[in-house]
Amino acid sequence: MKKKFSLLLSVIMLLSLFLAACSGNSSTSGNTNSEGKASGDSEGTEETSKEQVLNLTDTQDIPTMDTTQATDTVAFNVMNQVFEGLYRLDKDNKPVLGMAAEEPKVEEKDGETVYTFTIREDANWSDGTPVTAGDFVYAWQKIIHPDTMGGYASMLGTAGIKNGNEIVTEGDPLYGKVEELGVKAVDEKTLEVTVTQKVPYFFDLLTFASFYPQPAEFAAEQGENYSLETDTMLYNGPFTLAEWNHGEGWKLAKNDGYWDADTVKLEEANYKIVKDEATKVNLYETGKIDRVSLSADFVDQFQGRDDFSTILDTAIFFLRLNQKNEVLANNDIRKALFLAYDRDGLVNVLLNNGSIAARYLVPKEFLYLDGEDFRAPAPEGYLADKSADDAAGYWTKGLEALGKDSVEIEFLTTDSELASKIAEYAKEQFESKLDGLTITINKQPWKQFLDLEDAGDFDISTGGWGPDYPDPMTYVYMFETDGAYNRMDYSSEQYDKLVSDAKVESDQQKRWEMMQEAERILIEEDTAIIPTYQRGGALLMKEHVKNYHIHKFGADSTLKWVTIE
């Protein structure tokens, strides 16, 4: 009966689409990156029976759909819609039960804590096979195995899981011994996780893609083809990846086999890759997409409208300075670049979207301890008492030490319109204020950009970081010596010690002070990166899009509760 009803409903929906097209009307939806402010309540003139289709854009293609290999926001956002871990984030950024049927049983034993999770009986993959405890063990061991180690392998150690750090550390006796990881399938639906250190954000971490399961038997059968196409992966989330036209876009379709499918009202979400800002705005204005982020050129035009809003989010943007380059290995050169960059001009003129100038790594208005913002000791960041006038002095001193009077540096960035504008802005800032400097811009598609950055094949690269969990550690751990996201040959024993000590410190005030000092060393003393801005967003969203939720950490958004009214 249910199948016949679904078929009938599909026919009705297709007929409605046809009639709407004939009358010149298009029902659309939108791209997302806002503070969960889907529009306000319905006026009651339309019902939720409106076609449940959301039309979105993105500027980049999905680099990978293998949860053990993903390292970027595009992949994490799509994965959040089509996969699910033990928990997922709700509309208030709190972890709620996902694949876990109930809160775990907790047992203290020999100085360790054992969490026993029960997997839902109605949790299935999209081919109807059950999601098992073994699927979690398979994926968690895969991400830390030397042959398949992912960029986020350190996350298991970050979560305090037994032997998580040791297994990924070359030279450690346990290196590569994935069977020693503190995770065990007691039976098909019982997962045992042993932690040797309690972290306050443990359950938040379990919502992240690195902790998703993978269908063990299916993935093993697919081998190297796993997750390369829509039919070489299985799904256990609210949606499936129904289409993936590489370089053009993708389509999500409701997963009727999802355990909470009755809650999911959206039937599909279509993403089209569009790099040009004016094209995106035109698509929105003509009703072909329902949501669009605005660049500075369009903010003044739309800011008075009811569908316009701005946010300040938790992503920080910065420039990586690769110290493999002998010029950038000079601290005075790095400080000159830091001071030559006009952040106010960037955020007030070029961006003009609610972003704010940043001379720090950990953002404002996100992380608090006893009511105090992490930024309290240095609200505006570092080197704020110096200006572009000081840059010339550092530059001259650095060139003299190098025995040069001119240098050429390559600036690696992506090929989106905004990234290109920001790169041109940086080039102008640096070349106009630092005599003898020539900047060459290297624009690359997103995946190639990531590959070059991962390989350390750049001089300066444009970087951005959104938090994976609600703690300062999600930012400061990036720049540990040989860290997966260091990528720029930066190394400081003092920095490393502060970060490693903070990872095991139980006194929250002390560990925050350690991380605050580490951030100061990174930027004020070593000037290893050039923070530029804390991202804001100006956007338009159609009023018929309801319950679109944006997250402060982890994946950007959740479509599970979206409705079109």
Image (cartoon, rainbow, N blue to C red):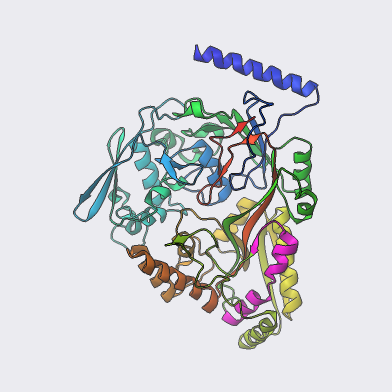
Query: Looking at the image, is 557 positioned above or below residue 3?
Result: below
Residue 4: say if magenta.
no
Query: Looking at the image, is 98 positioned above or below residue 316?
Result: above
Percent position (x, y) of residue 286?
79, 36
Q: Is residue 351 visible?
A: yes
Q: Quadrant of residue 106?
A: top left
Q: Is residue 304 left or right of residue 138?
A: right
Residue 355: say if magenta.
yes
Of 66 and 8, which appears nearest the observer? 8
Percent position (x, y) of residue 437?
72, 77
Percent position (x, y) of residue 11?
64, 15
Percent position (x, y) of residue 7?
58, 15
Image point 45% across, 67% down: which residue? 480
Q: How many marks?
A: 0
Of 277 and 235, which appears nearest the observer? 277
Image point 46% across, 26% down: which residue? 127
